[in-house]
Image (cartoon, rainbow, N blue to C red):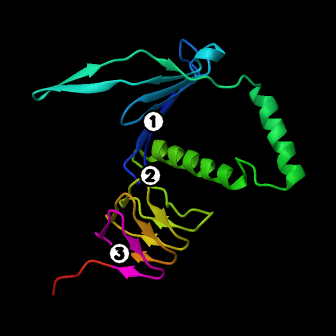
Amino acid sequence: MTVSLLAFPSGVKAHIFVSWLHPFKEQKLVVVGEKQMAVFDDTEPWEQKLALYPHRVQWHGNLPEAVKAEAIYVDIPQYEPLRAECEHFISCIRDRSAPLTDGEEGLRVLKVLNACKRAIEHGRPVALSKMSPRNRVYVHPTAVVDNGVTIGHGTKIWHFSHILKGSEIVDQCNIGHNVIIGPRVKIGKGSKIQTKIPA
């Protein structure tokens, strides 16, 4: 049995729980958003596999109260997953198009699995370098990049910087440590931004 805790630069956190000895079978993905939750449960009948829960928190003074709502089931087309995978594979060969899960995606998965293994062996968190093989963007593990941010090719974002929602950083920029950018600003190509160091 393992529990893997994942933290992303945007502030989003996730955990993965796996166990071969669990007393019941569970194949479930839960995504918690600001306004509702999505649950995909592959053990449920097809018409109930994907459900939305518009739960919310209601405040009474300083006391939170959970307001739970009924599940809203999302209609998804019935199709054999293995058949869909095989058809997509054949389509990519025929059209010479990139698959949804290519070698680069597989490499990223292996990097995460290796980091989890190192964390277990050494008993401490392991930071991954977020250098994307697709657009060569580097974001330091301590930096925070909000959702809705666009980052161009070759840009590097360093220690404890924060890129706010709606901002755009064009190619080849270098964002130094402790820099706050945004919200909704555009940084031109090749810009270098750093905090002023006191004399």
Question: Could you tell me residue 196's position as x and y percent?
Answer: 23, 81
Q: Which residues are magenta?
A: 177-193
- Element type where label 2 sits in the image: loop
Q: Amino acid at mark 2?
A: Val
Residue drawn at point x = 72 percent, y = 22 percent:
78
Q: Which residue is mark 1?
A: 15
The answer to which of 175 and 122 lies nearer the viewer is 175
Residue drawn at point x = 65 percent, y = 25 percent:
76
- Which mark is first along the chain, 1 or 2? 1
- Which mark is first along the chain, 3 or 1? 1
Count of numbered marks:
3
Q: Is residue 67 above or below residue 143?
A: above
Question: Could you tell me residue 28's position as x and y percent?
Answer: 54, 25
Dots 1 and 3: beta carbons under 8 Å?
no
Q: Quadrant of residue 48?
A: top right
> Image check: 187 left or right of 87?
left
Q: Amino acid at mark 3?
A: Gly
Mark 3 or 2, closer to the camera: 3
Mark 1 or 3, closer to the camera: 3
What is the C-alpha distance between the residues marked 3 and 2? 22 Å
> Image check: 154 left or right of 185?
right
What is the C-alpha distance between the residues marked 1 and 3? 30 Å
Question: Could you tell me residue 143's position as x and y percent?
Answer: 36, 61
Q: Quadrant of residue 15?
A: top left
Res. 19 in view: no
What is the C-alpha distance between the residues marked 2 and 1? 15 Å
Residue 126: numbered disc: 2
Q: Which residue is mark 3?
A: 176
